[in-house]
Amino acid sequence: MLHLKSADLMKEKIESLVIPVCEDKNIHEDKTILSLIKSAKKVKAFKGDKDDEVILYNLSEVSAQIIIFLGLGKLEKVNMESLRTMAGMAVKGVIKKKHTAVLMAVPLAAKVNMDMQNILEAMMEGTFLGNHLFDRYKKEKKLQPLERIDFLVTSDEAKKYRRLPSRISAVCQGTILAREWVSMPPNDKRPELFAKSIARLARKENLKVTVLGEKELKQKKFGAMLAVAAGSRNKPRMVILEHTPVKAKKTIAFVGKGVTFDSGGINLKPSASLADMKMDMSGAAAVAATLITAARLKLRLKLVGIIPIVENMPSGAASRPGDIIKSYDGKTVEIGNTDAEGRLILIDAISYTIKKYKPQTLIDLATLTGACVVALGEKIAGTFSFDDKLAENIILSGYKTHERCWRMPMPEDYKELIKSDFADLNNVGSTRYGGAITAALFLSEFVKDTSWAHIDIAGPAYTKKESSYCGVGGTGFGVRLLFDLMERL
Ligand code: BES
Ligand code: MN
Ligand code: ZN
């Protein structure tokens, strides 16, 4: 769907053309584009301010049915994210006009002080992700996504970056896969169904797939995970995906929290907090989509994805506050609160991963705490690690992809807060303050000496507000982040 195109604008037949414009400086070179911008600037209301838009029809210079000019604001403010946003808005505009294809004019690298590669990556991401509509559950599909998105470049650039469109498409397709899983209603992704859905797509890409059912989980003594699953009639699954290229030296493991619905269990959540708890498997979705995409792109790293999947429900069979369970690792945990279920499934998954795969690096993604959302808001993920280098790389990837991550502390003395009078640990802190930190410290008790990072994505995994390149629902947060990160490891 994404294509680099070098063409003479005057001679092309174009459905729709998008031209990004800066408010204070010219960022194009092509004479036809410059003359079109002149026409656009005759419209008084259009100055090229950020998010300014003007649409012109049937201009004489080119045979484009519509031309959309989009403001980028001041030149100094142009960066990858502003290009992503502009590109997403462009595609949404073209979709609304019922067109099927768009040609995007690309700013000159030298004029915007950026790498051409970064410009193209950002614009491709914005268009591809902005082109996604989640209307699977609507009878009437009001809008149709575009079939073709072209980027106007020189023939040298088209040659130099020829591999870019397929790579960016694949990673964005992974993001969209994660988005759709997260947005899917919980009745359609009960653990068995979600596991099957992952396994089917993973097998298609030749990943090694192992699915552990309830019986195997019992045999292997995944006590913490089973304690969470106990309340639901929908039985748990553990999905293990392995990507094993020849000659790979390091193993990187990703663990993703897969709670397909988090009611809170016996510590039932209040009504308002229940509605969106289908998103509590966002970590699992990101990990599964990352592994599937890595296999598709034939990445040269050995990767393992470990995905514990449960439904957290109250019932006569559910775990009670006060219960003491034995984790896979052997440590006992007092369940202070059945709503702190994520850390219980994660410790078993983490212990198993370390024992079985001895990865050089282990990263878990989880919608773990409301406290993290209180701390960092809905758009930034909390990042916890004892490994400075790993933390730094995650922060850098967050910056590049705009899947932003902020490092949080794990002070030794806070471990006091997760002590239990009766068991080795309590699954909740003795105070509600610092809830994201105590959750991370709880996980840290199970990572041994593995280089590990925990990314709390409770805020950014889901959105109730549409933005320029993401609709309402799952955001797919984590997939683009991990792909960027894998290049740094
Ligand atoms: N899944 C929730 C965390 C969450 C909250 C995700 C908001 C997305 C948005 C998690 O299982 C949970 O319930 N955490 C509790 C922990 C508490 C009981 C210690 C929380 O954050 O309130
Ligand atoms: Mn919970
Ligand atoms: Zn949860």
Image (tube, helix red, strand yellow):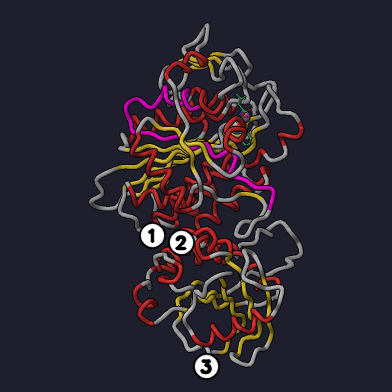
Whether residues under marks 1 and 2 lie with C-beta atoms below 8 angstroms apart, the answer is yes
Residue 269, x across and y down, in percent: 71, 28
Looking at the rendered structure, the kind of residue marked 1 is: Leu
Residue 236 part of the magenta-drawn span: no
Q: Is residue 430 above or below residue 367?
A: above
Q: Residues within 10 Å of mark 1 (few under 14, many from 20)?
A: some
Name which of mark 3 and mark 2 comes first in the sequence. Answer: 3
Image position, residue 89 (x, y; %): 63, 65
Q: Nearer the viewer, mark 3 or mark 2?
A: 3
Q: Residue at x 40, y 21 (%)?
A: 329
Q: Earlier in the sequence, mark 1 or mark 3?
A: 3
Identify residue type, mark 3. Answer: Lys
Q: Is residue 451 magenta?
A: yes
| Mark 3 Cα-neighbour bin, 10 Å: few <14, some 14–19, many ≥20 | few
| Relative depth, front residue between 459 and 287 | 459
Q: Which segment did they paint magenta? A: 440-465
- 25 vs 43, left or right, is left
Residue highlighted by disc 2: 170
Residue in the image at 49% along x and 42% along y: 405
The quarter of the picture showing ligand 1: top right
Q: Is residue 79 visible?
A: yes
Secondary element at image label 2 = helix
Q: Is 89 above or below relative to 479?
A: below
Could you tell me how far apart the alpha carbons at marks 3 and 2 are, in whole angstroms? Answer: 31 Å
Amino acid beneath label 2: Ala
* Percent x, y of residue 340: 59, 25
Toward the viewer: 448 or 411? Answer: 411
The residue singled out by tag 3 in the image is: 11
Q: Using the numbered discs, state the Cα–Cα distance from disc 1 to disc 3 in whole angstroms.
A: 36 Å
Up/down of 336 relative to 188, above or below: above
Give the numbered dot on residue 297. 1
